[in-house]
Amino acid sequence: MPIDTIVVFTARSPERIKREGGSQAWVLNPVHARNAKWLVATQNLHNKDHEFSDATEPHGSAFLIGRISGLKRSADEPGDRWLIEIDEYARINIPNAWKWRNPVKYTTVADLGIDPKRLTFQKVHKRTEEPATLQTESAMQWPPATLTIAEAKKALAATFGVKPEAVEISIRG
């Protein structure tokens, strides 16, 4: 079954995710991220004392599923970090759902035991500021119309799981 879900291990509350229009600031694999339809947020209480944390849910629990509407550069941490935008969400309660080391996991809703058809979704009100956009699915243009060598190296590095310094690009005229 193809990957359709991004699971994140976040120190943010469901209210903040709704207010921000999604979850941020994630380093993502653009190949997997652009094909994902769902965001599942799981709670990380290990960073509860940091200023960016307003966590309210039990540690490791999956508490929110959102329909992904796009990916945008994170306003909180610009650069190679992304806001996973959602246009609607449903609250869920799956205890001990987080089982991985890295804070981002690509999987399927079926593997998580979630059936979105059985959930009641509510609309999300988007943020007002508009960071640079990298959209998902059919609306996504990849590569972007203008692309720097550094951006291409970062994207290729994320795709192949290497550091950007390991990517060499040749342009022939």
Image (tube, grey):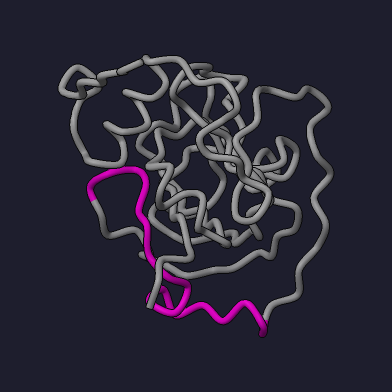
Is residue 158 positioned above or below 6 on the image?
Answer: above
Left or right: residue 163 compared with residue 66 = left
Image quarter where the C terminus lies is top left
**Residue 131, percent across and down?**
68, 22
Image quarter where the N terminus lies is bottom left
Q: Quadrant of residue 138?
A: bottom right
**Residue 142, percent across and down?**
53, 39
Query: Is residue 106 within the magenta segment?
Result: yes
Q: Quadrant of residue 3?
A: bottom left
Left or right: residue 75 compared with residue 11 = right
Image point 43% across, 42% down: which residue?
A: 30
In this view of the protein, which residue sits in the foreground, 75 or 165? 165
Image point 67% across, 38% down: which residue?
A: 16
Magenta segment's dominant SS is: loop
The span shown in magenta is 101-118
Is residue 160 positioned above or below 146 on the image?
Answer: below
Left or right: residue 128 compared with residue 156 = right
In this view of the protein, which residue sits in the foreground, 43 or 4? 4
**Residue 45, percent across and down?**
41, 41
Outermost residue on the front side: it is: 173
Query: Is residue 109 within the magenta segment?
Result: yes
Outermost residue on the bottom side: it is: 118
Image point 60% across, 62% down: which residue?
A: 65
Is residue 119 positioned above or below 13 on the image?
Answer: below
